[in-house]
Amino acid sequence: MGNLLAKMLGAASRQDPGAGTLTEFVELQAPMRSLPVWRRWIDENPWATSPHYVAAMVDSIRRFGLSDPLHGFALPGEITIDTSNLRESVLFRGINSRCRAVLKLVADAPLQHDAAVYASESLTPLAVALRNQFPNFIGSEYLPADDDQRKIPHARHEDVQALSFQDSSLDCYVSCEILEHVPSIPTALREAARTLRGGGLFLATFPFLQLQRESVVKAVLENGSIRHLAAAEYHPVDQRPSLVFSIPAWDIVDIANAAGFAAVDMVAMSSRKFGIVADCPILVMRARR
């Protein structure tokens, strides 16, 4: 591993970032269980945030394509890259870097073809990919108002703080860029733990304060009314602005443990092969029931 890292760092330092070969990239999928562990790893692996290394990955993907965990090989001409936001870019069939990281963990999990897989989205390319892979896939949208449900009549409505699923009925639950919009993350995680079978898998992405211990709460829901603790922040969800209640940090690991999960980590992911690339390794929350 030391020789590989030395070769890779040499390639990353070249003036031509595309000069390296495919073997000079690290396929990273490493569990991180706390902020001190993550800080130490970052300090010991400067390549992971090196602009030269990231640029080399992007250039290589542009020239040679990538392998999607579920869809297979993508030719260079089928990939769209916006270098200003790689986490949400490197698009192939609508799937970006962040979602491919989630799909990689789904593909690696010991899930049967008939597994009950749920995602808190139903109209996205990620939902389509999961539906095509798992016949028992269930997707949903948050449609609390009758008007919303009439606009999308075929979409299932679910509130992630009060899911309609029975206890221990799901094998895998995927939550992408949702938790920051939930008034109570602990409640949502308790619901996730309740609905998953023993050994079931919860995978989540969200804006993450990766160098902070404590989450930032920006708004709270009190007696049905929103009270802002900071300037209101909105992120687009289904092309509509959605209020951000909190930005999670490393304390979400403890929150998930308290919610009933047996093992929780943040998986650091970076992959030239699978097109999982960003300015820093992408962190995906993985919790086992």
Image (cartoon, rainbow, N blue to C red):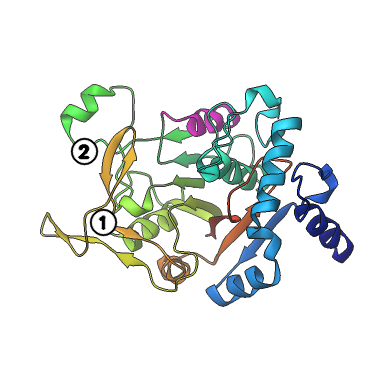
**Residue 65 visible in the displayed image:** no
- Residue at the right extreme? 3
* Residue at (35, 56) in percent of width and height: 188
In the rendered image, residue 156, in percent from the top left (x then y), is placed at 33, 31
Local packing at callout 1 (Cα closer than 10 Å; few below 14, some 14-19, many 20+) is many
In the rendered image, residue 206, in percent from the top left (x then y), is placed at 44, 52
Residue 61 badge:
none
Cα–Cα gap, marks 2 and 1: 14 Å
* Residue at (51, 42) in percent of width and height: 84
Is the residue 211 above or below the residue 71 in the image?
A: below
Nearer to us in this view, 60 or 172: 60
Report the magenta stretch's main SS: helix
Marks 2,1: beta carbons within 8 A? no
In the rendered image, residue 252, in percent from the top left (x then y), is placed at 43, 66
Nearer to us in this view, 198 or 152: 152
22 falls in the magenta region: no
The residue at which mark 2 appears reads as 144
Q: How many marks?
A: 2
The residue at which mark 1 appears reads as 183
Nearer to us in this view, 137 or 23: 23
Residue 215 lies in what quarter of the image? bottom left
- Amino acid at dot 2: Pro
In the rendered image, residue 254, in percent from the top left (x then y), is placed at 45, 72
Q: Is residue 163 left or right of residue 137?
A: left
Q: Is residue 127 left or right of residue 17?
A: left
Local packing at callout 2 (Cα closer than 10 Å; few below 14, some 14-19, many 20+) is few
Is the residue 83 above or below the residue 32 in the image?
A: above
Q: Which residues are magenta?
A: 123-133
**Residue 40 visible in the displayed image:** yes
* Residue at (76, 56) in percent of width and height: 13
What SS does tag 1 mark?
loop
Is the residue 180 above or below the residue 263 in the image?
A: above
